[in-house]
Amino acid sequence: MKTLKIFLPLFMIITMTVSFFQPIIATSENISDKILRLHIIANSDSTEDQDLKLKVKNYFLENTADLFVGQTLDENIEIAKENIDYIEKICNTCIEQNGFDYEAEVTVDREYFDTRVYDDFTLPAGVYNSIRITIGQGNGHNWWCIVFPSVCLSACSKSMDDYLTDEEMELVGDGYTPKFKVIEIYEKIKAKLNAD
């Protein structure tokens, strides 16, 4: 009986918290379903490997500015999948030109990202479509941006508000607030449960 007295109020608090944040969680999941992210993982955290990661990033952006021209997320994901070999080739060319013998591996899939604060907006934690470039062992810090809508591709002029609803833009434009922590906890638990 004592356990029930503790469990019942705790259950009620959790239920009320989840129901309060459910609209925000639903909005954040809608956002993650509309975005294609670029995720580059360095070989290690050495200064040389971190510098190489940024060079690979710049080389990728320079050589793919005209590649991701699809009008929808699905079109751009398909472009990425059809060009995995090309993306690996340009990454490996950059790595070789900089005197390293690492190989880059490219995958196009869905993966979990923590909350990310950019200059003008904040992306909530969640599972996003991504182009993942792993350099060598992939044991270093990473770098990421958004390929679609094309925030990190300078040749493109589409902005986030062309693809996100007013409600979604309000969420990403708020800056990092406590609600992002709630979303992050929820999404981490969900990603862990889906992985098991």
Image (spheres, rainbow, N blue to C red):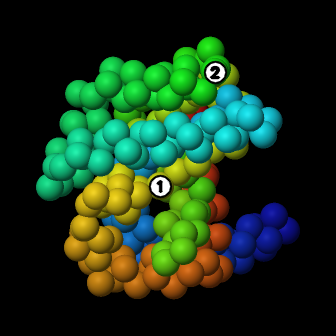
The reply, left or right, for residue 178 in relation to residue 83 is right
Quick one: 49 or 77, which is closer to the camera? 49
Proximity of marks 2 and 1: CB atoms separated by less than 8 Å? no
Residue 149 in percent (x, y) is at 30, 60
Which mark is drawn over residue 99?
2
Residue 176 visible to the viewer: yes
Q: Which image quarter: residue 178? A: bottom right
Q: Which amino acid type corresponds to the residue marked 1 in the rendered image?
A: Cys
Residue 47 in percent (x, y) is at 78, 40
Tell me which numbered mark, 2 or 1, is placed earlier along the sequence.
Answer: 2
Residue 15: mark in rendering: none
Q: Which residue is mark 1?
A: 145
Q: Is residue 172 left or right of residue 149?
A: right
Looking at the rendered structure, the secondary structure element under dot 1 is strand
Q: Residue furthest left?
A: 71
- Local SS, label 2: loop
Q: CA distance from mark 2 to mark 1?
A: 26 Å
Q: How many marks?
A: 2
